[in-house]
């Protein structure tokens, strides 16, 4: 089946006064219909910028400088703002991190949902309202008619995120970009939202790009995982393969730093050093200064992408195969 | 800390502050304008071609001459002359002196009174604080022009009365700001430490709390001085401010108003430009000071 | 809500009392109104007669108590100059002032919000920089001088608009207004711009900072992600959020517009209560000054109440907390 989204060599740079920041620098991946791709990385790794690049929501001084983003076969890079606006919310939707901030506090839920319907479909306001109510039911919000007349602050955080998901689903988009949508929520609500999102995507056949820093979330949700570091994807593959047998030292470090029941009592590993500033990356591999497996070539040339055991990998000295 | 080290630290802070101030070109222009204006006012007797209030030197034949006309004494009146034959440029230089003096004097008095009351409120607390802050609120809820108008209505004309009115509309801003900053400072550990070391209360206030309130006060002072100058000019223009014997810029503008409708614009226009430049210069400096000192200002 | 209104009214009474006391004692200490009322060639007996008639021979505190009692009965005394009821004179002039202040406010909003939005959404554009530089100028320009310049430019040099007076008025439900004739509009134009310029800078700055802040919020990005048009995002999502502080501040500033109309009315000979106040000050007409202060303070209190109600109508979060408390 043709991929819903194909991203190739995407580069999004920010021309700041302090210098050029290559937030995304040569990222490639694709997502099939109904598939969930987990995009994992620390804050500042460029994972959110990747999401916004797909949405066409990168604001100056940021700019997509090269590469290609194809949604359902259609090239998005270079589209006019108006053409892009016609796709946003209809073919590709986005869910944001903090549900407290994404809904406009001074507009009622119905206003915010109906305007989303009317942005793309010429239907009556009544019909739009019915669709909004149906979408709320779909995400498990009881008595939607009543809820539509409320303001966001009358909802809990989890409920608000459900509303945001309902809005994202209004036009049955081919792709949903979810930017850390559970990070701001309580753990119990988190798992509910995760389950809900997964179910809804399966039902509607939408592909899901789930951006997160949390490997545990990816383990439970995603089909495939892509690990980002300093603007590049360093390793991507099937989620079980990557998590069980990481090949890139960074992935390995990331997994090692997650506490788990099996490792009770043992010392929690951590990656030495700090995330590099994207404006001042070292020559060669960006991870080299922190890498336990660093060799001479790492400090000189950036590792090219290679295929190994069904994965795509950027490393000069990867872990040995299991 | 030794005195020398403290002085060094302070000069370092001042240097950093000055450097940040200089980063903004517009603010520098404002500062340059302000320096020129103040110098012009101070040096008026030496740079003005005529002492406009020396009756022996003013010739009624020179009255209402357009800009560029030659005075009877031979010098060129670049800005024209007013209704009784005074050289307008000289009048403006002398008027600047009065406007600036009234503005600065009322500002200093208001700052002193306001800071004293603000500190007292913050330090004494309780009923004293409630009383002072109630009066502050009451005063701030009245538009300044109205309060000043009513005060001069009650007090009458004269330099001293105008200054009283200007102080009355300004002091509350200082009191509110100083109280706010002082309350924040008071809760900080070093003040507790100073008190527990047995330092006197007066010493604590003047050595520790007051210096830390200065940044916002400086910002308020620039804005308020500009405001005071403008307000004095307004009152004088309305005929309830300074008397003709103290011809500030506002009085000059007022005197020119009657000639405006007959097209002799310059008598009001040029003093107004001088007033405007003064206020703009102060505000530009104040704007930058606000950015650099970044105090917790309300509004 | 009721408790809130009662507390507000109590505060207002205190403010009114304080202002009236200050004005009364100030006037008592400073001027002897008898001289204002007596004809120039009055004899000593005539003066004593006036003094007794108006009660000026009584000690200050007696006069003050009588004065308070009068106010409580709604009696503000008669203008020394005009001879008629002070409060009546003020109320007669009030519509002209309110009309002017209202027109000025509308002018400030009509121009300030679009300019502020533009400056806030495109902060690096040259036009935005020009607008902001202009707004600093607007803060600095003394109202009376701007008024003079407007007259000079539009009345004297260009001859487009009249410089003085209110022009013909039309009586609507007992209130004279100049909004119903072209000539009235022409007369209103310059004074309204003069008074409105004062608040234009404020509106621009408030709108700009609000728009800048709002445009960085996630809900704006989310609205874009929904595929909404730029017009709807700015006109609904951003504008509705920044209207709250703007309405609050402008409501409170309406009082200062009324106060500043003293200046504008004097320059443009606009027959409002501000011009009347200035004339009263120059003639030491104490009852009129006191009546003016009372009317303006009451106006302020009313405005504050209206602003609070408007505020809760605009911000749903406030409405809820209000209902809970």
Image (cartoon, helix red, strand yellow):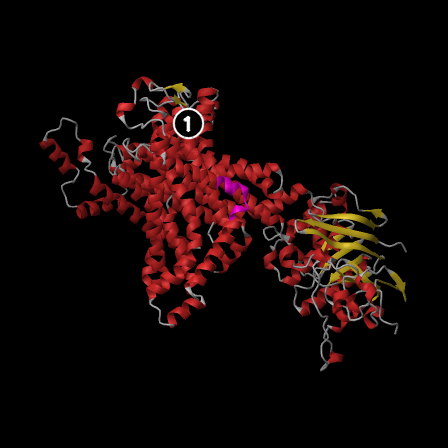
At a point 29% along the width and 23% down the height, the residue shown is B57
| In the image: residue C25, left or right of residue B1 | left
Where residue C244 sits: x, y (%)?
Answer: 53, 48
Q: Relative to residue C281, is residue C68 depicted above or below? A: below
Q: Secondary structure at mark 1?
A: helix
> Is residue B145 visible in this depiction of the protein?
yes
Q: Residue furthest front?
A: B4
> Is residue C139 visible in this depiction of the protein?
no
Q: Relative to residue C42, is residue C133 depicted above or below? A: below
Q: Place residue A214 in its image quadrant.
A: bottom right
In which chain is the residue bearing label 1?
B
| Magenta stretch, residue numbers | B21-30
Number of callouts: 1
Name the one closer to the observer, C31 or B294. B294
Q: Relative to residue A161, is residue A220 depicted above or below? A: below
Residue annotated with mark 1: B269
Q: Main secondary structure of the magenta part?
A: helix
For label 1, count other residues whose C-alpha is less than 10 Å away and answer few (under 14), some (14-19) or many (20+).
many
Q: Residue furthest top?
A: B61
Q: Is residue C225 magenta?
A: no
Quadrant where the C terminus of chain A sits is bottom right
Q: Relative to residue C290, is residue A37 depicted above or below? A: below
Q: Is residue B22 magenta?
A: yes
Where residue C305 sits: x, y (%)?
Answer: 43, 48
Quadrant where the N terminus of chain A sits is bottom right
At a point 43% along the width and 34% down the height, the residue shown is B276
Where residue C151 sits: x, y (%)?
Answer: 43, 25
Name the one closer to the observer, B195 or C130. B195
| In the image: residue A280, left or right of residue C86 | right
Where residue A304 sits: x, y (%)?
Answer: 85, 59
| In the image: residue C138, left or right of residue B252 | right
């Amino acid at each position: 089946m043709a991929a819903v989204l194909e991203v190739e060599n995407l580069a999004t740079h920010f021309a700041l006064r302090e210098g050029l920041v290559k937030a995304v620098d040569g990222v490639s991946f694709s997502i099939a219909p109904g598939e969930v791709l987990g995009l994992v990385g620390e804050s500042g790794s460029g994972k959110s910028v990747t999401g916004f690049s797909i949405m066409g929501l990168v604001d100056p001084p940021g700019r997509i400088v090269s590469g290609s983003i194809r949604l359902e076969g259609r090239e998005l890079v270079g589209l006019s703002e108006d053409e892009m606006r016609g796709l946003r919310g209809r073919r590709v939707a986005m869910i944001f991190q903090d549900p407290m901030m994404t809904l406009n506090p001074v507009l009622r839920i119905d206003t915010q949902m109906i305007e989303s319907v009317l942005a793309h479909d010429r239907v009556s306001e009544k019909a739009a309202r019915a669709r909004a109510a149906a979408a709320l039911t779909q995400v498990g919000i009881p008595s939607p008619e009543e809820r539509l007349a409320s303001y966001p602050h009358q909802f809990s955080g989890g409920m608000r995120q459900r509303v945001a998901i309902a809005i994202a689903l209004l036009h049955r988009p081919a792709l949903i970009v979810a930017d850390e949508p559970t990070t701001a929520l309580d753990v119990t609500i988190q798992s509910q939202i995760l389950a809900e999102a997964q179910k809804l995507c399966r039902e509607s056949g939408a592909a899901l790009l789930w951006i997160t820093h949390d490997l545990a979330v990816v383990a439970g949700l995603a089909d495939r995982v892509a690990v980002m570091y300093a603007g590049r994807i360093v390793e991507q593959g099937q989620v079980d393969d990557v998590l069980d047998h990481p090949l890139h030292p960074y992935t390995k470090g990331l997994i090692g730093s997650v506490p788990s029941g099996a490792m009770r009592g043992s010392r929690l590993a951590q990656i030495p050093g700090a995330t590099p500033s994207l404006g001042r990356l070292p020559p060669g591999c960006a991870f080299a200064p922190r890498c336990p497996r660093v060799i001479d070539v790492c400090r000189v040339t950036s590792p090219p992408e290679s295929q190994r055991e069904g994965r795509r990998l950027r490393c000069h000295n990867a872990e040995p195969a299991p | 800390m030794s005195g020398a080290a403290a002085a060094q630290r302070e000069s370092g802070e001042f240097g950093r502050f000055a450097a940040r101030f200089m980063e903004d070109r517009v603010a520098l222009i404002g500062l340059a304008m302000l320096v020129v204006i103040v110098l012009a006012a101070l040096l008026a007797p030496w740079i003005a071609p005529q002492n406009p209030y020396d009756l022996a030197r003013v010739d009624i034949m020179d009255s209402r001459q357009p800009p560029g006309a030659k005075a009877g004494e031979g010098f060129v009146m670049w800005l024209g002359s007013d209704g009784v034959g005074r050289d307008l440029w000289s009048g403006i230089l002398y008027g600047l002196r009065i406007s600036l003096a009234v503005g600065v004097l009322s500002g200093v008095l208001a700052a002193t009174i306001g800071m004293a009351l603000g500190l007292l409120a913050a330090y004494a607390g309780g009923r004293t604080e409630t009383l002072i802050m109630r009066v502050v609120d009451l005063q701030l809820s009245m538009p300044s022009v109205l309060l000043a108008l009513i005060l001069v209505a009650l007090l009458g004309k004269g330099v001293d009365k105008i200054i009283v009115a200007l102080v009355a509309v300004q002091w509350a801003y200082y009191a509110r700001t100083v109280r706010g900053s002082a309350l924040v400072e008071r809760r900080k550990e070093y003040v507790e430490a100073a008190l527990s070391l047995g330092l006197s209360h007066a010493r604590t206030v003047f050595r520790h709390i007051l210096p830390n309130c200065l940044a916002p006060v400086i910002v308020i002072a620039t804005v308020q001085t500009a405001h005071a100058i403008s307000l004095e000019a307004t009152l004088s223009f309305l005929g309830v401010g300074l008397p003709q014997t103290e011809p500030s810029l506002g009085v000059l503008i007022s005197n020119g108003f009657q000639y405006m409708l007959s097209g002799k614009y310059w008598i009001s226009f040029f003093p107004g430009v001088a007033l405007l430049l003064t206020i703009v210069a102060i505000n530009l400096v104040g704007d930058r000071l606000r950015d650099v000192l970044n105090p917790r200002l309300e509004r | 809500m009721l408790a809130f209104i009662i507390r507000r009214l109590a505060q207002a009474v205190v403010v009114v009392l304080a202002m009236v006391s200050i004005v009364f004692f100030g006037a008592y200490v400073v001027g002897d109104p008898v001289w204002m009322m007596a004809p120039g060639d009055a004899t000593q007996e005539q003066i004593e007669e006036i003094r007794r008639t108006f009660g000026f021979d009584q000690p200050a505190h007696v006069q003050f108590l009588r004065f308070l009692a009068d106010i409580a009965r709604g009696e503000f005394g008669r203008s020394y100059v005009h001879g008629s009821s002070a409060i009546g004179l003020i109320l007669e002039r009030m519509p002209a002032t309110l009309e002017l202040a209202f027109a000025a406010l509308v002018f400030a909003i009509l121009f300030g919000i679009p300019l502020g939005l533009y400056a806030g959404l495109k902060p690096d554009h040259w036009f935005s920089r020009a607008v902001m530089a202009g707004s600093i100028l607007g803060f600095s320009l003394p109202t009376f001088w701007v008024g003079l310049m407007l007259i000079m430019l539009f009345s004297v040099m260009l001859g487009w608009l009249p410089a003085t007076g209110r022009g013909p008025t039309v009586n609507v439900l007992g209130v004279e207004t100049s909004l119903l004739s072209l000539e009235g509009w022409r007369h209103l134009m310059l004074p309204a711009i003069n008074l409105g310029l004062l608040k234009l800078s404020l509106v621009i700055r408030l709108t700009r900072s609000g728009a800048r802040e709002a445009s960085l919020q996630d809900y704006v990005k989310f609205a874009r992600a929904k595929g909404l048009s730029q017009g709807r995002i700015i006109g609904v999502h951003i504008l509705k959020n920044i209207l709250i502080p703007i309405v609050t501040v402008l409501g409170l500033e309406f009082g200062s517009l009324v106060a500043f109309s003293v200046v504008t009315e004097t320059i443009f000979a606009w027959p409002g209560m501000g011009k009347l106040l200035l004339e009263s000050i120059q003639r030491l007409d104490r009852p009129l000054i006191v009546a003016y202060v009372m009317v303006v303070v009451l106006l302020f209190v009313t405005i504050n109440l209206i602003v609070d109600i408007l505020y809760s109508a605009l911000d749903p979060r406030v409405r809820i907390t209000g209902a809970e408390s």
